[in-house]
């Protein structure tokens, strides 16, 4: 049986309006969906998301009136060395009818005006890893136009949702660093000079894949720390997991408000 059929047998065939990928410490939103929950283990090709703080299940149902599919956990390039590891889940999102993909992540900030606990809407990215999930793709569709990869209309709608919720949502450029080690202070100074405002270990390969698949994409970071060398606080995964819920509560409100607007369109 195809993966799509298997999932539709469980969740129904009604097309989903938006797909979401939840980053470190942001899994709570999936718990509030009225629908079905399918562990990644039962889904062929899905990664065994092995990072603590992630919740590896697919949830399909209704959230704020919109039909959504939520990927509760992502696999990262640094887990396997495969930057295309999220392709099967994203293929499925498109097959389920999603036209919009909203990505979330935890990130370190370079900007004192976007401190830990704040949210940053991605305006663009810098692929500092040099890896690309489309390497090996044979069709000409691999030459993806990445101008406006972070969809301007979606960004405007998310900015409006944040305003309506009274949540400060700044915009900035996200740099993808492969991880899993954190960056050195010298690397952070270098990436900052290249034009990035925040750094993290995810999202960029998924945005490249999403654009390849024709999905409209937007991404929001919850800032968990100032980047290496920019503050005295010690950077660690424990700290990321502790800090992610601070921004996550605001992020949930913004996403819910946005989905309610989408549902009413
Ligand atoms: N660097 C990379 N990834 C991150 C960071 C960071 O400082 N904070 C949260 N994820």
Image (tube, helix red, strand yellow):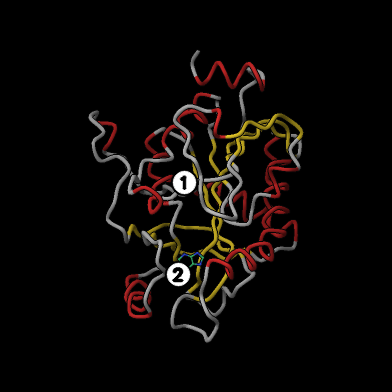
The location of residue 249, given as percent across then percent down, is 72, 59
Q: Ligand 1 closer than 8 Å to the CB at disc 1? A: no
Q: What's the distance in space between the residues labelled 1 and 2, CA to CA? A: 23 Å
> Mark 1 touching mark 2, by CB under 8 A?
no
Q: Is residue 77 above or below residue 138?
A: below
Who's the residue at 65% across and 49% down the image?
Answer: 27
Q: Nearer the viewer, mark 1 or mark 2?
A: 1
Which residue is labeled 1 in the image?
75
Mark 2: which secondary structure? loop
Question: Residue farthest to the top?
Answer: 1
Q: Nearer the viewer, residue 168 or 139?
A: 139
Tell me which residue sits at (39%, 61%) in the image.
179
Q: Is residue 184 above or below residue 73?
A: below
Query: What residue is drawn where x is 56% and y is 52%?
Result: 23
Q: Earlier in the sequence, mark 1 or mark 2?
A: 1
What residue is rendered at 70% in x and 63% in y?
167
Report which quarter residue 60 is drawn in: top right
Q: Of 248 and 126, which appears nearest the observer?
A: 248
Q: Quadrant of the C terminus?
A: top right
- Horizontal arrangement in the rendering, residue 69 relative to residue 217 (left or right): right
Q: Is 262 left, or right, of 175 in this rendering?
A: right
Q: Which mark identifies residue 197?
A: 2
The vertical placement of 10 against 245, above or below, is above
Q: Toward which corner of the image does residue 250 lie, by quadrant?
A: bottom right
Q: Secondary structure at mark 1?
A: loop
Give percent across and percent down for residue 45.
44, 30
Q: Pick whichever, 252 or 260, lies toward us.
A: 252
């Amino acid at each position: 049986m195809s993966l799509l059929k298997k999932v539709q047998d469980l969740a129904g065939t009604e097309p989903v309006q938006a797909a979401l990928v939840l980053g470190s410490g942001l899994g709570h939103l999936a718990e509030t969906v009225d629908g079905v929950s399918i562990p990644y283990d039962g889904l062929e090709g899905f990664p065994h998301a092995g990072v603590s703080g992630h919740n590896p299940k697919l949830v399909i149902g209704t959230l704020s009136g919109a039909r959504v599919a939520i990927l509760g956990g992502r696999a990262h390039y640094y887990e396997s060395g495969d930057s295309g590891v999220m392709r099967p889940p994203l293929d499925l999102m498109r097959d389920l009818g999603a036209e919009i993909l909203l990505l979330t992540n935890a990130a370190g900030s370079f900007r004192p005006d976007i401190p830990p606990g704040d949210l940053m809407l991605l305006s663009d990215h810098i692929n500092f890893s040099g890896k690309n999930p489309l390497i090996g793709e044979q069709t000409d569709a691999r030459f993806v136009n990445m101008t406006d990869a972070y969809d301007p209309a979606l960004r405007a709608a998310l900015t409006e949702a944040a305003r309506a919720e009274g949540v400060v949502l700044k915009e900035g450029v996200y740099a993808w660093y492969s991880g899993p080690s954190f960056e050195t202070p010298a690397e952070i100074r270098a990436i900052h000079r290249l034009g990035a405002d925040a750094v993290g270990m995810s999202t960029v390969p998924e945005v490249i894949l999403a654009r390849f698949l024709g999905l409209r994409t937007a991404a929001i970071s919850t800032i968990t720390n100032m980047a290496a060398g920019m503050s005295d606080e010690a950077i660690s995964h424990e700290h990321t997991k502790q800090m992610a819920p601070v921004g996550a509560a605001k992020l949930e409100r913004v996403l819910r408000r946005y989905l309610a607007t989408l549902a009413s369109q």
